[in-house]
Amino acid sequence: MLKAERLWALGAMSGTSLDGVDAAMVETDGAAIYAFGPSAYRAYSAEEQAVLAAALGKWPGEDLAEAQALVESAHLEVLSRFDGAALVGFHGQTLAHEPRGRGTHQLGDGARLAEGLGLPVVWDFRSADVRLGGEGAPLAPFFHFACAKWIGATEPLAFLNLGGVGNITWVDPSFARPEEAGAVLAFDTGPANAPINDLMLARRGERFDRDGALARQGEVAQGALELFLDEPYFLRMPPKSLDRDTFADMIGLVGELGDADAVATLTGMAAAAVLRGMEHCPRPPARLLVTGGGRHNGVMMQMLRAALDCPVEPVEAAGLDGDMLEAQAFAYLAVRVARGLPTSCASTTGVRAAVSGGTISRLGHPSEAM
């Protein structure tokens, strides 16, 4: 087990938006953040995105050789650019997430990365949580708690990640540790960028609605929005989590709309899901810090600002990097796993007890499940 000392860890994240691999370094002892280091990004080409998209929804044992080779080679390519890391946090590519059924599936073998990088690699972060009755997601909340401490927050605040799926972490920084009762609450709010990106690709051959430009030209179809908000998911109490395609029928709700109205409506759905989620916060947050690609969508941000009483800001307003926050999170979590510290608890994933979830692969040694 790793000693409680400061070290540089390297983390990587490839999200459900399938845009590419983020990698970043964090100096931490697994509790506090001491510094943020360099970062890098490796984009997926359109052809590579098609390979990954074809693998979505698949489970171990299915034909995934091409997708796995792509995930591992892309990660090796970007992670090999860094020097000075003591260990690596490798999330893998989520293909399927069904915590109450078949479990959760993140594609990629950390042992292969350990061999290629010559460094210990922590991976398979979610499986232990799911085995103990948790949702396995979201996993960044303990890092968000450390970020709240790092920025000097004194009042409760919330972090909103608008990636393929949206998730929120409410943090009370007056607590000493994130696993303490009342320190954090986290859950997936609903779909965010994934359905918008899918529609843009299908209709216009574009990866996303840059800056919300197309949504700005359209109007939200209220009937479709109301049908969306009737989904049982919004009645469930958190913690709760989603698969990328849980709300795949959203596309059908806007199928007869023109491009601009369809994208405006999907954007409105993502924002409305966040607003429903905010109702679960134990206390109103003093500010909402937004990370992920959705913070660049001016229409989505405007919708949130118009409906919420607290300031809605990109995380850059607090000195954080919204493009790299999740990669940094898995660097931080890797150190926690190596130290035997919990990475999730009842208020973040619904797991029965605080758990340190992850497998450690070292060059020339068998992988160790934590």
Image (cartoon, helix red, strand yellow):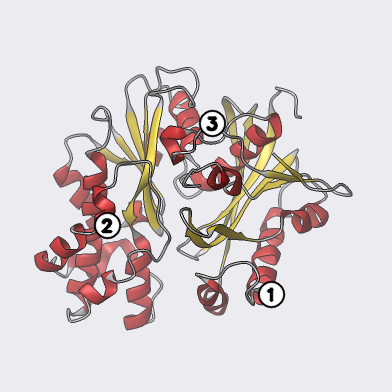
Mark 3 falls on what kind of element? Answer: loop
Mark 2 falls on what kind of element? Answer: helix
Q: Which mark is residue 354?
A: 3
Nearer the camera: disc 3 or disc 2? 3
Residue in front for this viewpoint, 174 or 244 = 244
Q: Residue at x 29, y 54 (%)?
A: 233
Residue type highlighted by circle 2: Ala
Residue type highlighted by circle 3: Ala
- Along the horizontal axis of the image, is 360 left or right of 245? right
Q: Earlier in the sequence, mark 3 or mark 1?
A: 1
Quarter of the picture containing the N terminus is top right
User: Mark 1 Cα within 10 Å, few/some/many (few <14, many 20+)?
Assistant: few
Position in image of residue 39 (x %, y %):
60, 48
User: Mark 2 Cα within 10 Å, few/some/many (few <14, many 20+)?
Assistant: many
- Along the horizontal axis of the image, is 150 left or right of 31? left
Above or below, 91 against 2 in this view is: below
Above or below, 159 against 19 in this view is: above
Position in image of residue 300 (x %, y %):
25, 55
Nearer the camera: disc 2 or disc 1? 1
Residue type highlighted by circle 1: Ala
Q: Residue at x 64, y 77 (%)?
A: 63
Residue 85 appears in the picture as rendered = no
Residue in front for this viewpoint, 135 or 196 = 135
Q: CA distance from mark 3 to mark 2?
A: 30 Å
Q: CA distance from mark 3 to mark 1?
A: 34 Å
Q: Which mark is residue 65?
A: 1
Query: Does the CB distance between marks 2 and 1 fall below 8 Å?
Result: no
Q: Which mark is residue 270?
A: 2
- Along the horizontal axis of the image, is 246 left or right of 255? right
